[in-house]
Image (cartoon, helix red, strand yellow):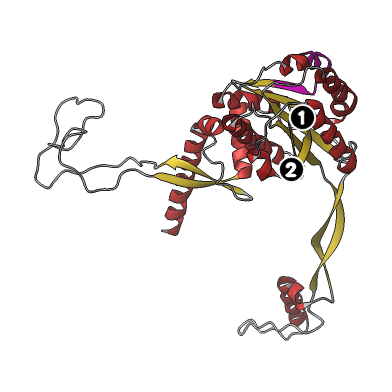
Amino acid sequence: MTQNIDKDLQRFKQIVRGKVRGNLRKYITHGEMLGRKGREVVSIPVPNIEIPHFRHGKKGSGGSGQGEGEVGQSLGPGEPEEGTGEAGNEAGRHIREVEVPLEELAAMLGEELVLPNIIPKGAETLVSQKDRYNSVRQVGPDSLRHFKRTYKKALKRQIATGQYNPSKPMVVPNRDDTVYKSWTTISEPQANAVILYLMDISGSMGEEQKEIVRTTAFWINAWISSQYNGLQKRYIVHDAMAHEVDEETFFRIRESGGTRISSAYGKAIQVLEQSYPVEDWNIYIFQFSDGDNWGDDNRECLNMLKDKLLPVCNLFCYGQVESPYGSGEYVRELMGLEDSWNNVALSLIEDKQGIYECIKDFLGTGK
């Protein structure tokens, strides 16, 4: 009975996962799970799943059916057509919250967008220390007592000395029989990554534009986290001046004034030089803007990219979010970099439907 229940549960989970996979593009573009995430799982709303079943008519209400019938025709007699009949008293269909591990969600994203796995750099230079219990010793605390080996050793001793009675089996370990788990500390290569998010918060970037950035960043984090042992995220906002902020502030702050993109690049350079040596870290920069920039600042931006940022980045991505108030000119300044730098990816995001292609433009490079 238990095995049948387990099989049914596994089958139901497969159906649910299939439902999530089938609607993944909708979740990507609309961000329906945002705000429902924990540290390791995400709650995704999916419609209730109807399992096919027979519906029996009333007792004695008819005989066997005759003829070919039509697709979808009811097997029961006299059932009212949809939308007719008296008011019902049953509950309607509800939305079910399904918890999906972030790792599994990232795998779905990779399959949906056909994303290549990332090959990290620096895997041999960052080292983490881990303790593994792979041996035993004669002394140790009771919490590390190895019961199986202790009783096996006691059994061997009793058999060798003739103390073991098969008809009345009893194994009593003594102090010499007791062994304890022991560990060795090993060093393992660890590939770490850092993401720098840069966003224009001038008056032309409205709430809709920020929601697009927030949704895109969620999926970027999910995929890159699945590719590295450790991931850190830093957030930089700017108008004419740049500031480093926390994640919540990054998506909520709004200011007005001019736009000077070079200020964000300067802050990014400062963060990297202080905390993330290029030989040890895989560095990703994702910049979002509506394309406005102070005219004389474009040349300074290109120089900072070529001299300081692009040489140290695994990937530099610029997403230009459509805004009725932005000029959209800055992406043209960056187009020439794609020909000379293979770690540059650009994407134009007209609305929420453009998030899907933006993620593919950014992460499809496999950098």
Q: Nearer the viewer, mark 2 or mark 1?
A: 1
Where residue 115 is drawn, which disc sits there? Answer: none
Residue drawn 76% across and 78% down? Answer: 142
Task: Classify residue 182 as left or right of residue 65.
Answer: right
**How far apart are the two marked residues, 2 and 1, measured between alpha carbons?**
16 Å
Task: Classify residue 167 as left or right of residue 50.
Answer: right
Q: Which residue is mark 1?
A: 240
**Residue 70 percent across, percent down from the top left:** 22, 25
- Secondary structure of the residue carrying numbered label 2: strand
Is residue 234 depicted above or below 115 in this figure? below
**Residue 6 percent across, percent down from the top left:** 47, 53
Which three-letter amino acid code belongs to the residue tagged 1? Ala
- Asked whether residue 54 appears in the rendered view, the answer is yes
Q: Which residue is mark 2?
A: 245
Position of the C terminus by quadrant:
top right
Magenta span of residues? 335-346
Residue drawn 59% across and 40% down? Answer: 105
| Rendering quarter of residue 306 | top right
Residue 181 in magenta? no
Which three-letter amino acid code belongs to the residue tagged 2? Val
Is residue 296 depicted above or below 245 in this figure? above
Is residue 132 depicted above or below 323 in this figure? below
